[in-house]
Image (cartoon, grey):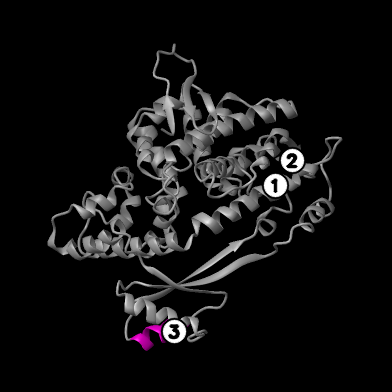
Amino acid sequence: MNCSLDTSYHPPGSAWTLHDAIHGTVHYPSYVQPIVDTPEFQRLRNLKQLGTSAKVFPCATHTRFEHCLGVAHLASTLLDTLERNSRVQISDIHRKCVTLAALLHDIGHGPFSHMWEDFVHRGSDKTWTHEQSSCEMARQLFANNAIQLSQGYEHFYAEQLICALITGNQEALKTLLTPDTMFLAEIVHNKRYKLDVDKWDYLMRDLFYLRGVIDVDSEFVRLFEHARVVRDRDGVTHIGYRARDYRWIVQLFEARAKLHMECYQHPIILGLEKLLIDALTQAEENGFRIKGTKISEAHQSPLVYQYLDDSVISLIETNESAKLQQVQQTLARIRCRQLYSRIHASSEPCDIDELNKRFGTDEFFQIRKRIPYGSEMAPRNVPLYDERGELVEDNDTVVEGVLSAIPDKGHFEQYLVYCKSTKQDVVSSAREYLENGSVSR
């Protein structure tokens, strides 16, 4: 079991206790439990954090439910750290907003992790993000479950701030926070420096459930212990990190890159996601609906979206419509492990049109796998402070001193060619044809 709840009685206003596989015994403020115990949040139990990865890594079955609880805990922990290290006082309403933004940051996620955004973008909504739906679902949660964040206008303010913290909307945050409190914008969704508690939890959690398969040193989490509030030249507050801990910042992004390389963008997983997108598209074209709504448009109605989770595949498989029989046959390939076959990998793209023409089919496709290395992703402008606690004016010396010792620069890029056909003679012939150096672009 990934986590368990302490269901014993707690007096009103006291903490709510949860036992988490990553963080151990965690105590939450009393206002967290009523939000967790809503249909909107409970939906996250049926969304695997790593989508289809469990088809390759059987232990990777943890969910967005426990991830969101973990992020909320880390947000509260970081707030405590900042108060202790910086001698700042964070108001109750700001603490509540940051904690709840962390708790609800993924409540708008679709099934099968980030694959769902790719599926939606093939439909009518080309710009949708799960953060947008997280805000809409959060507003529905508050309204439908009579959740009062505060009294009067402060409830409206808190709702706006929670949504701005989820999306990382810098313009909105500048109107909702003052220069003294702007550092709060860098805790949940840090658009500026990309260091936040969301990454902190998902890296620790994913590495935990993939341990023994993907081994990464997680010492980087220690960098948050020394985080403190600093001010830039304009007097605006940010979260600063010790200059000597910059190596851990790079290590964090190296861990992320390795997870992308060996798990998130594993060749089998990429092919499986394409199969699922094909099946979902075909199901929608043949009339499959959730409460009368196209599944690629379900996010447009929170009342519909709260019923959409990973079980959508089972709903399609058990639907009795004759129009869905072909889709059901496609989905049966997943259960029988008859997935799209990867037949070639190269640093150069393949001319897929020519390949399909050569074999008289349209069953070949190509996926570009591009992963920035940790040295590329690590923020160079993150606020750093020296041994005296003073902000480092020029990061270049510190940054280059760390990055110069790292061999991997830039990004990893690879082009993967797949075949949809289950006919082994077609797969073998195409593989041999490509291995002989044909059809490179």
Amino acid type, mark 3: Tyr
Which dot marks residue 258? none
Residue at the spot x=38%, y=50% of the render? 110
Q: Which residue is mark 1?
A: 249
* Magenta extent: 351-359
Disc 2 is placed on an element classified as strand
Question: How crowded is the residue under tag 1: few (<14 C-alpha within 10 Å), some, or many (20+)?
Answer: many
What mark, if any, has residue 433 been given in the picture? 3
Q: Nearer the viewer, mark 3 or mark 1?
A: 3
Overall secondary structure of the magenta section: helix
| Badge 2 or badge 1: first in the primary sequence | 2
The kind of residue on which mark 2 rests is: Tyr
Q: Indicate the position of residue 348 as horizontal and vertical percent values.
A: 56, 78
The residue most toward the top is 11
Quadrant where the N terminus is found in the figure: top left
The residue nearer to you, when weighing 377 against 138, is: 377
